[in-house]
Image (tube, rainbow, N blue to C red):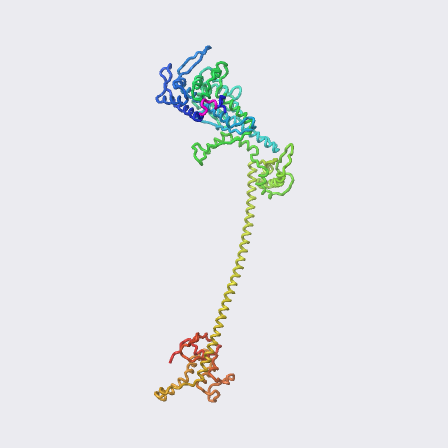
Amino acid sequence: MRGSSGTSLKELPSPGYPIQKTIWKILAGLLHLGNVHFADSEDEAQPCQLMGGTKVSVRTSASLLQLAEDMLLETIQIRTIKAGKQQQVFRKPCSRAECDTRRDCLAKLIYARLFDWLVSVINSSICADSSSWTAFIGLLDVYGFESFPDNSLEQLCINYANEKLQQHFVAHYLRAQQEEYAVEGLEWSFVNYQDNQTCLDLLEGSPISICSLINEECRLNRPSSAAQLQTRIESALAGKPCLGHNKLSREPSFVVVHFAGPVRYLTEGLVEKNKDPVPPELTGLLQQSQDPLLMMLFPANPEEKTQEELSSQSRAPALTVVSKFKASLEQLLRVLHSTTPHYIRCIKPNSQSQPQTFLQEEVLSQLEACGLVETIHISAAGFPIRVSHQNFVERYKLLRRLGPHTSSGLWGLCSAKGPTEQPLCAREATLQPLLQDILHALPALIQTASAPGDPAKATQVPLYCGRTKIFMTDSMLELLECGRAQMLEQCARCIQCGWRRHRLQKQEKQRQAAVLIQAAVRSWLTRKHIKRLHIAATVIKRAWHKWRIRMACLASKELDGMEEKPMPRAPSSLSSSLPPAHTKLLGAIIHLWPLGLVLANSAVGVRGFQRKLVAHACLRLPTGSPSNKFQTPQQDQAGITSIRALPRGSIKFHCRKSPLQYADICPEPSDSSVTGFNQILLERHRPVQV
């Protein structure tokens, strides 16, 4: 691992010494050196004195850099001059401004050597041998275009680099476009665009340019004047279109019209910054350092000579900042021309670093500074939209429904025309019929979108069909997207109609199935209910028949028993105690009480003839007596031989409640039924006891 001076890390005095700590010590010493300030001296023959409180900074800086404190302070305060053929040495005290300049120069010298050494060490550690690789990936971070109220040599160099990179970007972009069109077989000539070559001629042109005039001022052995430099630039470059002058500015300046906008540069201090001299005594001071890293960065080699010594001996022009920057930029451009660059534009949304805040003016100014506006103009002049055949077919295959599926020539389309027709692969062969159908549908789409009175729009070339890509403009892309949206809307409407029809049909089937299920369930429930009613009715009917038969049997037994037994007579004690008239009356009551019951209930459903028969039986009247006022019909002339023959139901002669179940309950009488003693005895009302 070797640095810029050719010394490896293994050559350090202490191999085990941590190199990172050494770097941090040097950087800390540079920071403390920046805190050193000087005061004006009353006597020009005496060096400037340190301001109060800065002696500590000098001591700390000298300790970190491992330099002698007195030697460090003397080198900054006193300037050494060699003059004459004999190289006589003169020591001259520096002014306050010169002391500050020498202090800054010492810090920049150490920092520049340290930075170059770090870059070389990192490259050596991560880069393999050049014989083992053929390609590389480089990352270039370029600061954007700068335009401040006061601009100096730093802004001039940065904007000069941006001009060169913008020219390379435009050339690379146009070359890439032309190569792509040639590969796809398209015949196209670009329109004129704004070139920044005039601005580059103003900055670096030959024989006279701004850079050459600034370098010439540095070579002149005279004090530089800002007003004189402004006058010289305006007079020498008066005919340049990109050079301007701000008449309202009180300070000497000139204006350069860059591709991103005009910028005003101040001529004050421009020559001094371009010289950037390094006094030899500063280099000699650093060669005396005891720090191992500084000893490696500033080796004490007597053969090496400083820049001023070389320039004084050879009388060659001194190497200025502009010359170094220009040489480095040309080397960078050679690398870019030999590689395939890719550009990434970074946009700062706002200056306050606030999230979700985009300032339109700042973003627009950055886009203009990056050259994207001109790039957009160039892209718009050609075909900014490029889509591969596969992606084009996948996205716009819906448009095939607009036109007929034919294989004839394309209307209003320009196909690729190349010197040699390459054979299509199988994938491209399958895409060609679909692509042809889509392209044949475009005329109908264009005819629909164009106005009726604008035939030129309907006949213009909408797109180009290359070998592997489709080239189109923004207007054609909008037309295709509009047609695709319409087709998607139609497809969505068709899907919605089908879905609604399917949903309605499904709902109708569900309704019919529900009705069928409900009918089956209701039929089953009705049959079940009727079956239960039939079973209950059968049980009730069977029990009722059993009850009737049982009641009839019980009534028959009771009647048979009463007929066989004679009518009991009144007790002798009772008859003897009663008078004879009362005794006859009691016998008549006992004998005729059924007749009273019959007459009391004869109004309910008993016909007149049946009532006569009952009365005859109770009164024991002769049936065929001529003195009888009752007339008997022919069907009933046989007469009634027994009271049992009259009623159809069972009869029981007791007033108390029967011990049999349901003996006191009878169904409702009907008009057609024949009632008798069964109805009398089975009355709902309880009989009154005498």
The residue closer to the viewer here, 84 or 508, is 84
Give x and y (percent) for residue 365.
Answer: 47, 31
- Residue 210 in view of the camera: no
Q: Is residue 590 left or right of residue 163?
A: left
Give x and y (percent) for residue 284.
Answer: 44, 17
The quarter of the picture where residue 134 lies is top right
The residue closer to the viewer here, 632 or 61, is 61
| Magenta residues (range) | 9-16
Q: Residue at x 48, y 89 (%)?
A: 626
- Residue 567 in view of the camera: yes
For residue 382, above or below residue 641: above
Residue 10 falls inside the magenta stretch: yes
Give x and y (percent) for residue 121.
Answer: 49, 25
The quarter of the picture where residue 92 lies is top left
Q: Residue at x 40, y 78 (%)?
A: 656
The prevailing secondary structure element of the residues shown in magenta is loop
Residue 226 falls inside the magenta stretch: no
For residue 562, above or below residue 482: below
Q: Quadrant of the C terminus?
A: bottom left
For residue 36, above or below residue 443: above
Figure label count? 0
Q: Is residue 74 left or right of residue 446?
A: left
The residue closer to the viewer here, 35 or 69, is 69
Give x and y (percent) for residue 234.
Answer: 48, 20
